[in-house]
Amino acid sequence: MKFYNTLHRKKEDFQPLEKGKVTLYTCGPTVYDYAHIGNFRAYIFEDLLRRYLEFSGYDVLQIMNITDIDDKTIRRSIEEKLSLENFTDKYTASFFEDVETLQILPAHHYPRATEFIPQMIETIQQLEDKGFTYTTEDGSVFFKISQFSDYGKLANLNPDQLKSGDRVEDDEYGKEEGRDFALWKGYKAQDGDVGWDSPWGKGRPGWHIECSVMSTHYLSNHFDIHCGGVDNIFPHHENEIAQSCAASGEAFVNYWLHNEHLLVDGQKMSKSMGNFYTLRDLLEKGCSPEALRYTLISTHYRSKLNFTFEKVKAAQKCINRLRELKRRLKKINNEEAEVLSAETESMLSKFSAKLGDDLNISGALGELFIWVNYLFAELDNDKLDCCSANGALSALRKIDSVLGVIECENLEVDDNIQELIIEREKARSDKDWDKADKVRGQLDELGIVIDDTPEGTVWKRK
Ligand code: AMP
Ligand code: ZN
């Protein structure tokens, strides 16, 4: 298994620190608004990574933080005249709803930054004791980047770009400003009632220290994989490395994996550009969660992905084909033994090998659909025996443990659609053709196409 490690700018064999176990930290949402699907590209890439590691037999421990305090959350909660807690609770709850809708496996812990302030203060004190910091008149504490010789290695900064002694207070800033950054920010009037007592006076933590403290709290000082979008490489992850290694004196993370951006019309999808879709927006436009998931997964995580509705439609077609295969296999499936045919075994091992090459998803899906087409041909020619059909069904379940698009809660429980289908079937058995047509029209408006097969009516999304 190989992954592209941003730290060394090359693909490297993956060797976890402890045999059979993987410790994984994924930067989570800043809960100042609904997450957009660009953010979900990051979380879905991380989900694919986690599911693939589990598919390969690893026991994964995943932590995702919730950034419920930073420049943006404070500013927006004050604008909305809500306490920081009430304000961030609302967007944290909506984030969890979206995670569930998109079939993202929940992380094992979702620590909130505001629950870790004492530990952050403790780490800043350690850094202070070791001479990595200085305090300014307003009670802010800065990390002195000149004290940390590896500063700039992750983002591949040129040493001329580093201006230690110059300070930057904002949580986010550009590469050209490789400067001393804030670990602790002294209280200012614009922080409203947000602030904690500390050895440096009232204030609040900087964004970067949050992830250093919460990751090592659960995963120990040195762990396997840290992920995030490419915009996190600098300054966020660069600063995390500096703080964590300087505080513990140990190595921090072995593999840094970063996903490229989701674009709209060639521009990064982002709140500040105003060119974003939330999951809610897209569900209202009739996209299914599984088609969105497939769209976000099916382009390699290190390539830019331009979002279009055509891509979502194409994704839905692929899912429909997989579901249709499952339905036809189930039809001939019975209690007999399960046999993995040579074709099925070969597909599973090729699918896994492709993903093992830095999550080469197009290669993996290519192998899957060669097998799908082969099975349809076998089914059409009545050549598939029960045992092989059972084996194929179980392979499909394994594949879906990685893709997460075939079996879908939302699909099974779409009561409204099921009710309409029953109503239409009743109308048909009563020979009330007008009524049956009317219901078909209603389903069509909901984006559902139905097909009357010898085994009854089946439905799929357009
Ligand atoms: P934020 O809530 O801004 O801290 O972002 C949460 C995660 O989403 C981070 O890992 C970002 O790198 C990632 N992210 C933000 N915008 C995009 C985008 N347009 N495409 C892919 N990932 C993104
Ligand atoms: Zn982070």
Image (cartoon, helix red, strand yellow):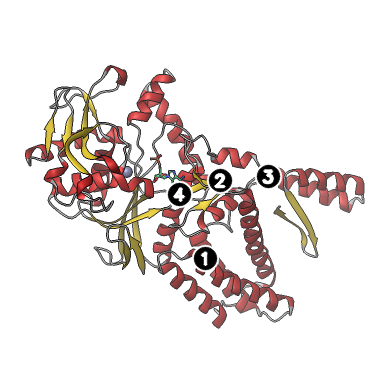
Q: Earlier in the sequence, mark 3 or mark 1?
A: 1
Q: The N terminus appears in which quarter of the rendering?
A: bottom left
Mark 3 to mark 2: distance in Å? 36 Å
Q: Which residue is mark 3?
A: 415
SS for dot 4: loop
Q: Is residue 95 left or right of residue 418?
A: left
Q: Which label number is shown at residue 265?
A: 2
Q: Amino acid at mark 1?
A: Ser
Mark 4 to mark 3: distance in Å? 36 Å
The crowd level at tag 3 (other Cα within 10 Å; few <14, some 14-19, many 20+) is few
SS for dot 2: loop
- What residue lies at 25% left-to-right and 20% top-to-bottom? 188
Q: Amino acid at mark 2?
A: Asp
The crowd level at tag 2 (other Cα within 10 Å; few <14, some 14-19, many 20+) is few
- Which is in the foreground here, disc 3 or disc 2? 2
Coordinates of residue 181 in the picture (x, y in percent)? 22, 36
The reply to whether the residue tagged 4 has its Cβ within 8 angstroms of ligand 1 is yes
Q: Amino acid at mark 3?
A: Asp
- Which is in the foreground here, disc 2 or disc 1? 2
Mark 4 to mark 2: distance in Å? 12 Å
Q: Is residue 139 left or right of residue 76?
A: left
Q: Earlier in the sequence, mark 4 or mark 3?
A: 4
Mark 2 to mark 1: distance in Å? 23 Å
Q: Which residue is mark 1?
A: 362
Whether the residues at callouts 1 and 4 have beta carbons within 8 Å, the answer is no
- What residue lies at 56% left-to-right and 45% top-to-bottom? 265
Q: Which residue is mark 4?
A: 261
